[in-house]
Amino acid sequence: MKNYFQFEKLGTSFRTEFMAGLTTFLAMAYILFVNPSILGETGMDEGAVFAATAIAAAVGSILMGLIAKYPIVLAPGMGLNAFFAYTVVLGFGIPWETALAGVLASGIIFIILTLTGLREKVINAIPASLKLAVGAGIGLFIAFIGLQNAGIVVADPATLLALGDLTSSTTLLAIFGVVVSVILITFGIKAGIFYGMIITALAGMVFGLIAVPSGIGGIVSGVPSLAPTFGQAFLHFGEIFTLEMLVVILTFLFVDFFDTAGTLVAVASQAGLMKDNKLPRAGKALFADSAATVVGAAVGTSTTTSYVESTAGVGVGGRTGFTSIVAAGFFLLALFFSPLLSVVTAEVTAPALIIVGVMMASSLKHIEWDQFEIAVPAFLTVLIMPLTYSIATGIAIGFIFYPITMLVKGRAKEIHPIMYGLFVIFVLYFIFLS
């Protein structure tokens, strides 16, 4: 094992890698409870989604560790799960089974793009400003959902939105969770989101807002059945061949594509693994990520992707794929703690959504706002996502306006032909919706 992962060459050890894996797991363990909460809105069985989340994370992380040998851990992605639930299923009215088939298709396409080397061409086709805008827009969308779930923002017949009842006990619990999580993360605690959820749940139980688990059976049990979700993606694969599903699949693919690329570069840079500003074994890492998406769709969860929280493990010394394998082991162990889903209510998960939104919005600082032809499509991409409750619509608007503003500005040579193709697809998308 030491030779395979090159412990000595990379200046690490078994103990260091183990602690790095545990740290990364704790930093992203919140997804075990947040993902079933979000996908459960579609009617999917939360127990099955919990198991699928843990399995997809474990399989993806093992593949990343063994094949690419990077200390990067995977799990169903935040933002992509929100797109799956709120835009595709609840917004478009597409059955969750068909949506899973769309996730499966995007994973297969991702594998093909990786194996054929087309990945670089697609990455280079999308301007940096739009990549950054999509990430920030998803962050605002996720935070908006968190504010709604907390009862901090509510519907209003006169103004569409308004401030909720801040004297409500459940809303106060969510606000408490936000404050605690912010304090923990500000202090530099890597697993601040996860610990914040634990503290919020405990406070809810103390004040009688959340039912206290009864006995050991309320904490530990057998692994939830995957039967409600397992294999549905394959059974409904024939339903994806529509223009609407084409846009859905493109969005799944697009977000996962650049989320993964960004995470790989960020984690590898922090770990000092970049060589001549290039990422060694990038193809293997992307293959592991795309294969994990296929596995996740098969067992019953939204797109699986690389997590930037992996930097938490790198921060304590993780340098090899063994870090990922250790984290995978903890995800498998977590399969036996599904009863805790009952105490992780919407008020408990809301702070996690808001904090993740803050983190994702940080990409706004890199957009060239002083160039109007770039600022317009980027701004509309970010703004439209939360206002229309649709990640796909935000991406579509941005991708339509980008060629227009760039052409008018006389910068046609900077527009990749792929962008013109996407322009046509998204225009047809709106015509189809109307």
Image (spheres, helix red, strand yellow):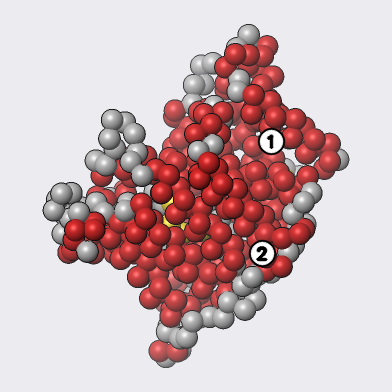
Residue labelled with disc 1? 396
Neighbours of disc 2 within 10 Å: few (<14), some (14-19), many (20+): many
Residue 85, image quadrant? bottom right
- Name the outermost residue toward the front: 116
Secondary structure under tag 2 reads helix
Seen in the picture, residue 130 relative to 257 is either above or below; the reply is: above
Kindly tell me whether residue 372 is visible in this rendering: no
Secondary structure under tag 1 reads helix
Front position among marks 1 and 2: 2
Q: Nearer the viewer, residue 174 or 69?
A: 69
Quarter of the figure that contains the C terminus: top right
Residue labelled with disc 2? 233
Q: Position of residue 109 (x, y in %)?
A: 60, 48
Disc 1 from disc 2: Cα separation: 25 Å
Q: Position of residue 274 (x, y in %)?
A: 29, 37
Q: Position of residue 425 (x, y in %)?
A: 74, 35
Q: Residue at x 64, y 24 (%)?
A: 417
Neighbours of disc 1 within 10 Å: few (<14), some (14-19), many (20+): many
Q: Position of residue 13 (x, y in %)?
A: 16, 59
**Kind of residue indicated by mark 2:** Ala
Seen in the picture, residue 220 relative to 260 is either above or below; the reply is: below
Position of 74 with respect to 40 (left or right) is left
Q: Nearer the viewer, residue 19 or 142?
A: 19
**Kind of residue indicated by mark 1:** Ala
Q: Earlier in the sequence, mark 1 or mark 2?
A: 2
Q: Nearer the viewer, residue 405 or 34?
A: 405
Q: Residue at x 56, y 47 (%)?
A: 112
